[in-house]
Image (cartoon, helix red, strand yellow):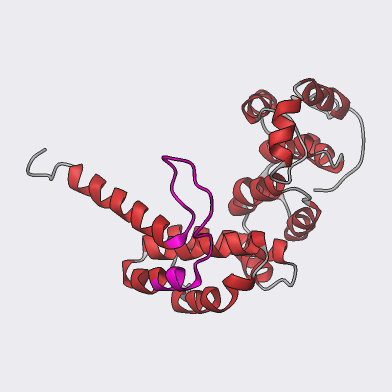
Amino acid sequence: MPEKTPGRTPTGPTVAEVTAELAALEDPRIRAVNEKHGDDHGVNLTRLRAIAKRLKTQPDLARRLWATDDTAARLLSLLICRPKALHRDELDTMLREARTPKVHDWLVAYVVKRNPHAEELRVAWTADPDPVVASAGWALTTERVTRNPAGLDLPALLDTVESEMSDAPDRLQWAMNHCLARIGIDHPEHRPRALAIGERLGVLKDYPTPPGCTSPYAPAWITEIVRRQQEDATAKPSPADA
């Protein structure tokens, strides 16, 4: 998507007009919170989404916003682009250009997952030597674990997690831990091993978790979500009772 042609798009506002609107939403308090997580913008995301809703899909504008290298503009670009129209190499370049965690996460969640090259990129990124790129591959793998596990070698994934997660850099470790948790949640036949791996490695065991939130520590995460699922299943009336 990188393209640096300025000016007005054929069907909408100029990049300058949009970035000025985003700049007017800048809130120092929001920026201070975001900077603690590695993000460098101060725009309320609900308001940013409202702009995207108004603009609708505008691929040309999306490309130009991405080219600004401004985090808020890039987040908006990901909401108004056409995910299925982006080429594999474009997505790979964009991922490597994504400087901040929020842009990285939205690119994977809102664009790559909806692209026909998602599986090809998942395989390539998971094996990439850059841990941030590899974390995107693991995020796509977690999506498959939950939604489309056919063809995945879940025992092999658990082997990799068991051998590599403890020493992985933060973002990659977080993504691998998420995959471990989803294997334990979504695949009961692998749940005992997933729990055992999480307990033995202890990754994120001491992660500060606010009251009422689920801990990212895999054994706690798996146990809590499975408990909720079982409660929901018990609460639903059977066909005979309906």
- The x, y position of residue 158, in whole percent, is 48, 75
Which image quadrant is residue 36 in? top right
Taking the spot 67% from the left edge, 27% from the top edge, the residue there is 44
Depth check: 83 or 23 in front? Answer: 23
Taking the spot 68% from the left edge, 35% from the top edge, the residue there is 33
Depth check: 206 or 213 in front? Answer: 206
Taking the spot 91% from the left edge, 29% from the top edge, the residue there is 7
Quick check: 237 left or right of 191?
left
Quick check: 67 left or right of 86?
right
Count the numbered circles shown: 0
**Vertical comparison of 164 with 222: above or below:** below
Magenta part of the chain: 196-218
- The x, y position of residue 219, in whole percent, is 40, 62
Residue 195 inside the magenta-drawn segment: no
Quick check: 144 left or right of 102?
left
Which image quadrant is residue 19 in? top right
- The x, y position of residue 160, in whole percent, is 55, 77
**Vertical comparison of 211 with 117: above or below:** above
Residue 84 seen in render: no
Depth check: 40 or 86 in front? Answer: 40
Which image quadrant is residue 51 in? top right
Residue 46 seen in render: yes
Secondary structure mostly seen in magenta is: loop
- The x, y position of residue 217, in whole percent, is 47, 59
Taking the spot 65% from the left edge, 61% from the top edge, the residue there is 170
The quadrant of the rendering that contains the C terminus is: top left
